[in-house]
Amino acid sequence: MTARQHQQRFESLLQEHRGIVFKMACLYSRSATDREDLMQEISAQLWRSFGRYDEARARFSTWMYRIALNVAISQARREHWSEANRFEPLATYHLETVGGGEPIAEQDERLQALYAFIGQLDPLNRALILLYLEDRGYAEMAEILGISETNVATKISRIKQKLRGQMTAAKTTGA
Amino acid sequence: MELDELKMAWREQDRRLERSEALQSSLRRELSIDRMRSALRSWLWLPGIELAISLLTAWLIGGFLADNWTQVLSTPAGAVPALVLFMLAVVSAAASARQIVSVATVDYAASVLSIQRRLAMARALRIRLTQLGLLLWLPLWPMFMVFIVQYGLGFGVYRQFDLAWLVSNVVLGLALALVLVWLTRRYGNVLGRWRPLHKLSDSIAGRKLASAVAQMDEFARFERE
């Protein structure tokens, strides 16, 4: 494969899965500028690692999740995760305008609740919930994160319990 | 509201994103190869500069020692500052090279936990080296001064200030370094209010290192529980 073909193949795969990069950047950044920076960081790392990508070993999306999560978590930790306001919900900016255009869409109540909930999680549990929402199986989640399937199942169950508890508390207080 | 119900909202969001023209054109722009190349360049230049400075220092001092070898042999004590600084430059270059190799060879396609652990270890090493570098400056500045004045400017300062003077200054510098660590730990909150001092104070006091170690503990817990 020539260098040009290699680049074209990468661009085509990236275009096909660009939603992953965008959603990852949304979950691990605070502002539109942060999000753009993170998208660039993720893409740069994907391009740098693409030479070693072996489709016989992993699906492109699995490979991409690993790289994108590693970059996103590293950047989040480097920049602001240790600060006191680390649990700020993400909902406020997420579906604002993109590239100076029109707002993408109005957010519904469930989506707002989801982002507020995800905003409370630490980077690793945030990765776990993202993979769950993306309908990845437990085996694939375990492979991406580097933990056992049992551990994945336990953590998902805990997150569900936590969410249930919060929703119940919100109903009780009328919030 | 259950997590599965929220999953439906997530899928709905996916469909909206897919339909959004503004988003698609923005993504095409952000994910262009040219932007990726510029991001890679910015990643490489900073550690490269550190390595270049260390190598240049080692080369300059090493060259000086080689050119004045007979003088060094006749007054070995007088060469102590140059030798110490040369060794420090070599160690610093090796540490910079190690960091570059360590980060450059990280395979981001490996599992999240293993890579995060490796990056946290690299970060802890870098923080430790920064802390050491900041603190070593205090005991070593007399050596640096002697080297510059004696060999750079040609004044026989070493004859005026002998080995005892040098050693006592190094000891005083070490004591000051310890006082500085105590001060930054004790009054970290006050120093942290002034932004330029915030990071410096955290590095000297070891708070950054503690945070890196806490991260590694967090990874271990995530894997275990």
Image (cartoon, grey):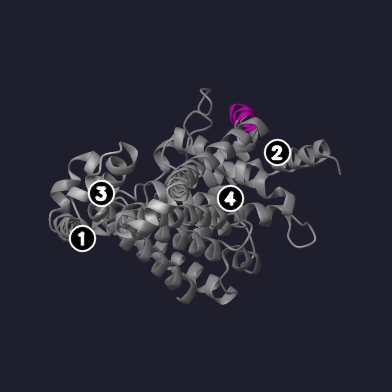
What is the x, y in percent for residue B124? 40, 60
Q: Would you name the residue on which mark 2 appears?
A: A15
Judging depth in this view, the residue of A148 and B32 nearest the camera is B32
Residue that mark 4 sits on: A68
Magenta run includes residue A138? no
* Tally of marks: 4
Q: What crowding class fits label 1: few (fewer than 14 Cα within 10 Å), some (14-19), or many (20 or more)?
A: some
Q: Is residue A106 left or right of residue B166?
A: right
Nearest to the eye among marks 4 and 3: give it: 3
Taking A101 as reference, is B80 left or right?
A: left
Structural distance between the alpha carbons of marks 1 and 4: 52 Å
Count neighbours of disc 4 (C-alpha within 10 A) and say few if under 14, some if 14 to 19, many if 20 or more: many
- Using the image as rendered, state which of residue A141 and residue A164 is in the foreground: A141
Q: Mark 2 and mark 4 in contact (Cβ < 8 Å)?
A: no
Query: Which one is nearer the viewer's eye here, A106 or B109?
Result: B109
Give residue B167's mark: 1
Kind of residue sitting beneath label 1: Val
Which residue is at a point 16% across and 47% down the rendered structure image? Answer: B191
Is label 1 on the same chain as label 2? no
> Is mark 1 in CB contact (under 8 Å) with mark 2?
no
Q: Residues within 10 Å of mark 3 (few under 14, many from 20)?
A: some
Secondary-structure class at tag 1: helix
- At x 57%, y 55%, the residue is B101
